[in-house]
Amino acid sequence: MWLGLMIGNSRLHWAWFTGATLEEAWDTEHLPASVVESLLLHCKEGELPREILSPRLIARWKNYHPSPQHLPIYLASVVPTQTALWQSSPVVTEITLEHIPLQGTYPTLGVDRALALWGAGVTLGWPILVIDAGTALTFTGADSDQQLVGGAILPGLKLQLESLSQRTAALPSVELPIQMPRRWALTTLESIQSGVVYTVLAGVRDFITSWKQQFPTSTIVLTGGDRSLVQTYLQAEFPSLAAEVIGDPYLIFWGLRFLVQSI
């Protein structure tokens, strides 16, 4: 049994594996140093941290390990200040870009993008395009030789909304709508929703169209915290395009699983 941890820009993404089987996945906020220190001590001594684990997982661990045994954590991170809180523990193995056998990477490629792309490719086949609708909205693609073709990064849906409210004097804070907003809005709130949602969707369509021209047989996968909303919007605005897109929230963990098995 082992824990996977992806430290993202906004949250910690956790996964509990028994061998290659994903038992449970969940998110928490970034943790303060004192909590991380306590958590790692518990994992080292085999007394699992109740701060992050459900009673079901703790009971499952104790059934497998009646005597104390440390719980290994495999960690990847895009937040250096958070990474530093975890690195010194003997139960933690950090996964970096160098561990991922993707061809043609560049030094500043985010390990989260590389892991998600690798996880998608090894589970769904190559070529592959991953669209990650998280804090940032990213496009990352690889060809049939597992060679990075490239990608793009723009602010995610919520980040765009936040930037308007925080960097302007009169525009309000706005939530993402559950359904597609009206394109031609008659209130400021709906106008912001319309502007962000429709322009992001147009960009998503454009990138998918361009990718399919180069790789007509490629699989396209959507992941990230806003995955379900983006899928809903795509279905409403471009249903034929939406039918070509697979949703999978666990791509990073599929990539992590492959690497853990090979270590």
Image (tube, rainbow, N blue to C red):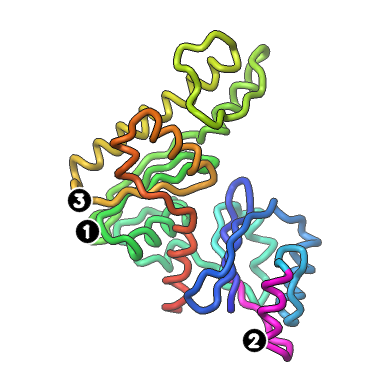
* Residue 54 horizontal/vertical position (percent): 71, 66
Name the quadrant of the C terminus.
bottom left
Q: Mark 2 points at which residue?
A: 64
Query: SS for tag 3?
Result: loop
| Residue depicted at x 57% and y 33% | 158
Question: Which class describes the residues within 10 Å of circle 1: few (<14), some (14-19), or many (20+)?
Answer: some
Taking the magenta stretch, the answer to whether it contains residue 148 is no
CA distance separating discs 2 and 3 = 44 Å
Name the quadrant of the N terminus.
bottom right
Q: Do the residues labelled 2 and 1 touch (CB within 8 Å)?
A: no
Please, what is the three-letter code of the amino acid marked with disc 1? Ser
Can you say whether 28 is above or below 177 in the image?
below
* Residue 244 horizontal/vertical position (percent): 30, 44
Please, what is the three-letter code of the amino acid marked with disc 3? Thr
Label annotation for residue 217 = 3
Q: Look at discs 3 and 1 and give the one toward the viewer.
A: 3
Query: SS for tag 1?
Result: loop
Question: Which class describes the residues within 10 Å of circle 2: few (<14), some (14-19), or many (20+)?
Answer: few
Please, what is the three-letter code of the amino acid marked with disc 2? Tyr
* Residue 127 horizontal/vertical position (percent): 25, 55
Label annotation for residue 144 = 1
CA distance separating discs 2 and 1 = 40 Å
Is 45 or 24 nearer to us in this picture?
24
Can you say whether 217 is above or below 21 in the image?
above
Q: In this view, does 236 lie to the left or right of 11?
A: left
Can you say whether 172 is above or below 209 in the image?
above
Q: Give the range drawn in magenta.
A: 55-73
Taking the magenta stretch, the answer to whether it contains residue 64 is yes
Q: In which quarter of the image is residue 211?
A: top left
Can you say whether 43 is above or below 198 in the image?
below
